[in-house]
Image (spheres, rainbow, N blue to C red):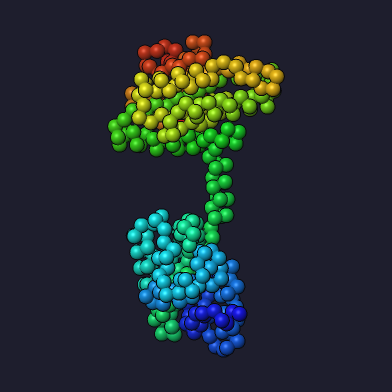
Amino acid sequence: MIMQRSKPFLSSRTKNAPATALLPIKPSLQDDISFSVWLEQSPDALLITDTAGTIEYVNPAFESLSGYAQGEVRGQSPSILKSAAHDAAFYRTMWLTISSGGAFRGMLVIRRKNGALIHVENTSWPITDSEGRIVHYACQIRDATERLQEIDKLTHAATHDPLTHLPNRTLFHDRLRQALRQAARREEELAVAILDFDRFRDINTRHGHPAGDAVLRRVARRIAGCVREADTVARIGGDEFALILPSAGEHASTHVLEKVRDSNDGTMQHNAYLIGVSLSIGAAIYPRDGTDAQALCKKADRAMYAAKQAGGNCVRFHHASDPNCARAQCPITAT
């Protein structure tokens, strides 16, 4: 029965408590019973401590969320849920906020009894008596796992290509700007490469768009298999990919780009057809060819067009002395 569980005080009032977790003043026994029912049946985990932070009460939703029974946590500190995801300054800020009369709201990572880590939305606040003195603290915890999963899905959809699941143009330029800042701090070189199919339109015309999509997915996997974990492979256009190779000058990136070119030089089977595939690759080097994303992308694109003009299926680096790079068009700019 509800009344057999250890109940919290019910005569105090709240300050800065969330609207969904108000603790009303107790004017009668009926209100006492109704409030106990609310606490016990709340879908959110609720925890109440004394002024020293010692747990006095948790509801069934807390037990379900944390894996701890009320008897296991009563008399314990809420730090029993602490994970290594937050530093001491984070918890210090939380405590200073509520001990000074404010409400603390934020996303927490807590550790369940079984050791599993989960993300939760947390609201903690002080409970005061009729004279405004803090007499208890309350905490409302809500599992945020599904919410974060939905956010992750939306974020992934906004930043990744749906066909290949590679970063899209937006994420590519964001990563490039980050990589350039890091390269500047470390005084390192960095390579940016633009990769374009040779005669990709012929694939779609002869074999249909499903075949073209299958080729794009396979090429994306092959490119990703040629680079390091720290590198970025992105699909930035219909048949166009891009690479960011941190800590790589022309010599180091030549090896990687030739490996990419070679792995995609030949035929791919789709259904009953053998489809010929090759790539033209152009690259530019930071800081030799530019110090910002737009300049490097333009020069890598010029080098890619120079590779196409040389017959395709090759790698070209931007060089100011190369007349083909100077004449090539460059429709790609950083955003």
Q: Position of residue 268 (x, y in %)?
A: 61, 20
Viewport quadrant of the N terminus: bottom right
In depth, the one of 139 and 102 nearer the eye is 139
Give how far across and how far down residue 175 sits, in percent: 44, 36
Q: Position of residue 195 (x, y in %)?
A: 50, 23
| Residue closer to the observer: 55 or 244 | 55
Residue toward you, 63 or 104 = 63
Q: Count the numbered circles shown.
A: 0
On screen, residue 93 versus residue 21, left or right, reads: left
Residue 30, position as x, y percentages in the image: 60, 87
Q: Who's the residue at 41% across and 58% down the image? A: 83
Q: Residue at x 36, y 26 (%)?
A: 248
In the displayed structure image, the side of residue 328 where residue 266 appears, left or right: right
Q: Is residue 328 visible?
A: no
274 or 99, which is in the foreground?
274
Work out whether residue 222 can be spotted.
Answer: yes
Residue 318 figure quarter:
top left
Q: Residue at the bottom extreme?
A: 28
**Residue at 37% across / 34% down in the picture?**
180
Write down the quadrant of residue 133 in the picture: bottom left
Rendered residue at 39%/23% (across/down): 253
Residue 325, relative to residue 83: is it above or below?
Answer: above
